[in-house]
Amino acid sequence: MAEAKKTLRLTQVKSQIGRKYDQDRTLRALGLGRIGKTHDIVDNESVRGMIFKVKHLIEVEEI
């Protein structure tokens, strides 16, 4: 059987206003853009890299 993919729940807790352009675009790529918005995404290396770039703006929860 194939392994079950881990899922991460991302929630934006701080605004992207006044942040660098690439951080704003990274939030958009993760499916976020407003404070309080939540998005479930499959865990992989590229997503972990994007999370590291905006870790000060979001909360991450494993589900």
Image (cartoon, helix red, strand yellow):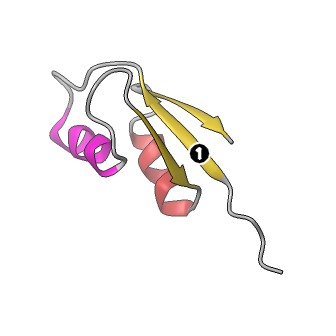
What residue do we see at 68% from left, 63% from top? Answer: 5
Quadrant in the picture for the N terminus: bottom right
Left/right of residue 59 with respect to residue 57 in the rendered view = right
Magenta portion: prevailing SS class:
helix
What residue do we see at 67% from left, 40% from top? Answer: 62
Quadrant in the picture for the C terminus: top right
In reply to whether residue 23 is colored magenta, the answer given is yes
Please state the horizontal and vertical placement of residue 2, each as a whole percent of the image.
Answer: 77, 78
* The image quarter in which residue 36 lies: top left
Q: Is residue 62 above or below residue 49?
A: above
Q: Which span of residues is magenta-colored?
A: 20-29
Left/right of residue 32 with respect to residue 16 in the rendered view = right
Please state the horizontal and vertical placement of residue 50, each as a whole percent of the image.
Answer: 42, 49
Residue type for callout 1 = Leu
Residue nearer the viewer, 62 or 23? 62
What residue do we see at 34% from left, 18% from top? Answer: 14
Q: Is residue 51 above or below residue 1?
A: above
What residue do we see at 27% from left, 20% from top? Answer: 15
Residue nearer the viewer, 2 or 50? 2
Residue under pointer 1? 8
Residue nearer the viewer, 61 or 54? 61
Left/right of residue 9 with respect to residue 38 in the rendered view = right
| Disc 1 secondary structure class | strand
